[in-house]
Amino acid sequence: MACERSHTSDSRDGRGDDDQQGGDTGKGMETVSNLIIPLILGGVIGGALGWYLALNSRSDNKRRVIMDLESQLDQARQSRADYEAEVSEHFAQTAELLHKLTDDYRSVYTHLAKGADQLCGDQVSISAAALSPPNDPTGGQPQGVDVAQPLDYAPKKPDEQGQLSETFGLDKSNTTAA
């Protein structure tokens, strides 16, 4: 009867053998959910941490690449500036040497002209303009020379036919009505 009593008391409580098994199943679900929740949380936290570290490492690589490219750009700008300075210096020196060459040529020409005048007398005529430095702002081009525009046709006399005429170059005796 003791067994019946425990069984009946279990029946009165509303718990039977099925409920006890369901209770064990509920405890099993609790342990599974207790394992799954930390596992999911760990995965989410680990994924977020990995994503953050990946972005930081990419940013560091990008920063490094950007810094390298900026330094290369600065070097290129510096070398270009150096090159421009060398070119400018070269042309300044070239202009100076050409000016000196012009002065030396004028000195040689003056020396030869004076020598020719002393040695040859009136037999050689040297213009004074050739001995003086050029002061002409036009670059030595003669003044007052009219340059005509080129013609796109052959000039003709007023009583002649032009080359564009339909009868130009045709012999009038051979012309017959067709």
Image (cartoon, grey):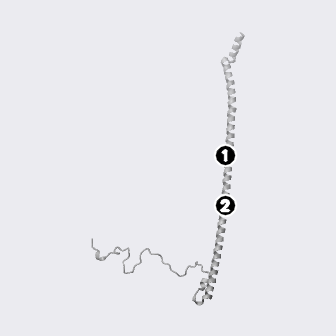
Residue at the far right: name it. Answer: 2
Toward which corner of the image does residue 105 lie, by quadrant? bottom right
Which of the two discs, 1 and 2, sits closer to the camera?
2
**Residue 67 image point, x, y percent:** 68, 52
Q: CA distance from mark 1 to mark 2?
A: 31 Å
Q: Which residue is mark 1?
A: 58
Amino acid at circle 1: Arg
**Front residue (pair 9, 34):** 34
Mark 1, secondary structure of its residue: helix
Q: Which residue occupies 67% across, 46% down?
A: 58
Q: Which residue is mark 2?
A: 79
**Residue 88 image point, x, y percent:** 65, 68
Toward which corner of the image does residue 173 lie, by quadrant? bottom left
Q: In the displayed structure, would residue 55 be above or below residue 1?
A: below
Q: In the displayed structure, would residue 120 be above or below residue 57?
A: below
Query: What is the number of the mark on residue 19?
Result: none
Q: Residues within 10 Å of mark 2 (few under 14, many from 20)?
A: few
Which quarter of the figure is the N terminus placed in?
top right
